[in-house]
Amino acid sequence: MSDIKTTILTLRAQLERYNEQYYLSDAPTVPDAEYDRVMRELIALEKAHPEFLNADSPSQKVGGAPVAAFNPIPHAQAMLSLDNVFSLEELKAFEKRVLSRLQHEQPVVYCCEPKLDGLAVSLLYEQGRLVQAATRGDGRVGEGITENVRTIKSIPLTLKGTNWPTRFEVRGEVFMPSAGFLAMNEHARARGEKIFANPRNAAAGSLRQLDSRVTAKRPLAFYCYGVGLVEGAPLADSHFATLARLKSWGLPMSPEVKLMTGISGCEQYHDAILAKREQLPYEIDGVVYKIDSLALQSELGFVARAPRWAIAHKFPAQEELTQLLNVEFQV
Ligand code: NAD
């Protein structure tokens, strides 16, 4: 076997192991920055040697397989991941690709959002009532967590208004606000119990519980950032207007979401959010830019694991490997 192929297989095995620890056990052993570094190394090698690329590579897949203890819930529309960039150069390259695919000369409008550090959920509403909730799982099938989600106060069990579609999926992030996270860990420490490494693991570990009474005691919150299946007519012709409709029905949306024009607008948004990162009442690991026009989104379409019309601009890592390894995890 060639050296390149051996390296690719080693990186894949390493990422599979990290995925299992992160998605299935909610207990990562390396910081996200290290995971991202290994993933980028793998992507670069696969790009340079496409003869070794296959659909089973972690670079082509979303999340982890759903855990059997939860009810499997097939998503009516797949839940994908996001491609990411770490620098302005990479962001400019993203814009160049987008404009060239769209054959656009002028910059387009982006919906800019905080990248909340929690876990993605899909909420199914029928006749205005929450009937099912699932984790992302492997993107096609998620884990049924309906009873747990019902305990999160900011998620409406019944929508306001009357003009919602008969059946539709709301997509968003369940997260643990920093104050609740610190108080919960303080309480656990005082009682000699295990503590969580960070709010992301705390949110995932709290939501992926088999007993919803445990979830009910955890300080979880939710912001919506999109839709999946929508039966009947689309909710609006832009992403931002879609979120505004969700908000009007009582679904919480981050107050930081803003429309900006072109990558220079996105850059301004990035810098403004980065500057207030410490003041935000929840943790974020970057910002997300989404092309606002749904017509342009559908022109761009998707690749295997992510839409072409969105990109996550990640912030510098806050967490050090030593910090992670010094903490015992609670699932
Ligand atoms: P991702 O977290 O980079 O991006 C996709 C996710 O972002 C969505 O599923 C959603 O949950 C979230 N998100 C937050 N705000 C959003 C918004 N406004 N709009 C849309 N989505 C939003 O991708 P991923 O596939 O979930 O996970 C990969 C990342 O997870 C890695 O880059 C790494 O940071 C982390 N990870 C870490 C380990 C580890 O061992 N430390 C293992 C696996 C994954």
Image (spheres, rainbow, N blue to C red):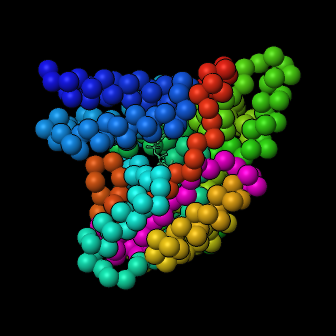
* Residue 112 lies within the magenta run: no
Q: Quadrant of residue 298?
A: bottom left
How many numbered tags mark residues here?
0
Q: Say whether residue 238 is visible.
A: no
Res 180 visible: yes
x and y percent of residue 231 in the render?
A: 39, 65
Q: Is residue 49 left or right of residue 113?
A: left
Q: Which residue corresponds to the image point at 27% horizontal and 35% vertical from the top-left?
A: 57
- The stretch in magenta equals 278-300
When the figure is inspected, residue 287 is found, relative to residue 16, above or below; the finding is below
Percent x, y of residue 16: 37, 27
Residue at image location 30% in from the left, 23% down from the top:
10
Q: Residue furthest right?
A: 190
Residue 325: x %, y % from top left: 61, 21
What residue is at 45 percent from the left and 27 percent from the top? 18
Horizontal side of 10 relative to 125 (left or right) equals left
Near-viewer residue (321 or 136):
321
Question: In which quadrant will I find the C terminus?
Answer: top right
Determine if the magenta segment contains residue 297: yes
Question: Which quadrant is the N terminus positioned in?
Answer: top left
Between 254 and 155, the one nearer to me in the picture: 254
The answer to whether residue 166 is above or below residue 68 is: below
